Image (cartoon, grey):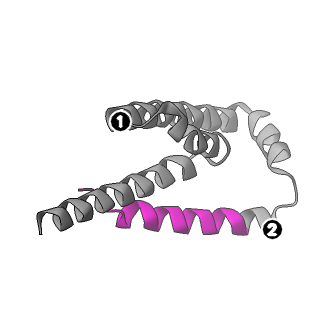
């Protein structure tokens, strides 16, 4: 059974930081992305980040299928990943851990 402590802590900390930065930003998220892609050095980092996000998306789909879930159940996480790269996989890990705990509790209550 996976612990949700680490992904939940990372999700909450990163999400709070993201909201804080976005509230203070002087440009839209799209303008920020365009400015990052306008220079080769920052574009390389963005491309690398989205390659990793794609790998995380593929993993989420395969993991959901192996757990008997439909691909559609992963779509919200994929959309979050497309916009806020780390948020989608972190939330997926948290929710997967919550589901595992519920199943374990239900299994224990059936035994007793």
In the picture provided, is 98 more to the left or to the right than 112? right
Q: Is residue 69 above or below residue 23?
A: above
User: Of circles 1 and 2, which is in front?
Assistant: 1
In the image, what residue occupies the spot 66% across and 35% down? 41
Bounds of the magenta segment: 1-20
Decide which of tag 1 and tag 2 comes sooner along the chain: 2
Image x and y of residue 108, in percent: 17, 65
Q: Is residue 58 left or right of residue 87?
A: left
Judge by depth and name the residue closer to the eye, 43 or 58.
58
Establish if 106 lies above or below 28.
below
Above or below, comparing residue 7 to residue 83 in the picture: below
**Residue shown at 64% from the left, 49% from the top:** 84
Q: How many marks?
A: 2
User: Which residue is pictured at 85% across the width and 51% down the height?
Assistant: 28
Residue bearing the label numbered 2: 24
Name the residue carrying label 1: 68
Q: Residue at x 32, y 33 (%)?
A: 66
Q: Position of residue 21 (x, y in %)?
A: 72, 64
The quarter of the picture where residue 26 lies is bottom right
Is 9 part of what is drawn in magenta? yes
| Residue 1 locus on image (x, y percent) | 23, 56
């Amino acid at each position: 059974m996976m612990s949700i402590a680490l992904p939940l802590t990372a999700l909450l900390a990163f999400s709070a930081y993201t909201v804080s930065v976005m509230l203070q930003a002087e440009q839209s998220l799209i303008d920020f992305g365009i400015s990052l892609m306008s220079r080769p050095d920052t574009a390389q980092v963005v491309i690398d980040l989205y390659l990793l996000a794609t790998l995380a998306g593929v993993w989420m789909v395969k993991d959901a299928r192996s757990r008997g879930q439909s691909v559609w159940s992963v779509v919200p996480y994929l959309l979050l990943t497309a916009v806020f790269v780390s948020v989608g996989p972190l939330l997926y890990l948290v929710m997967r851990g919550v589901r595992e705990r519920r199943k374990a509790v239900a299994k224990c209550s059936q035994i007793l």
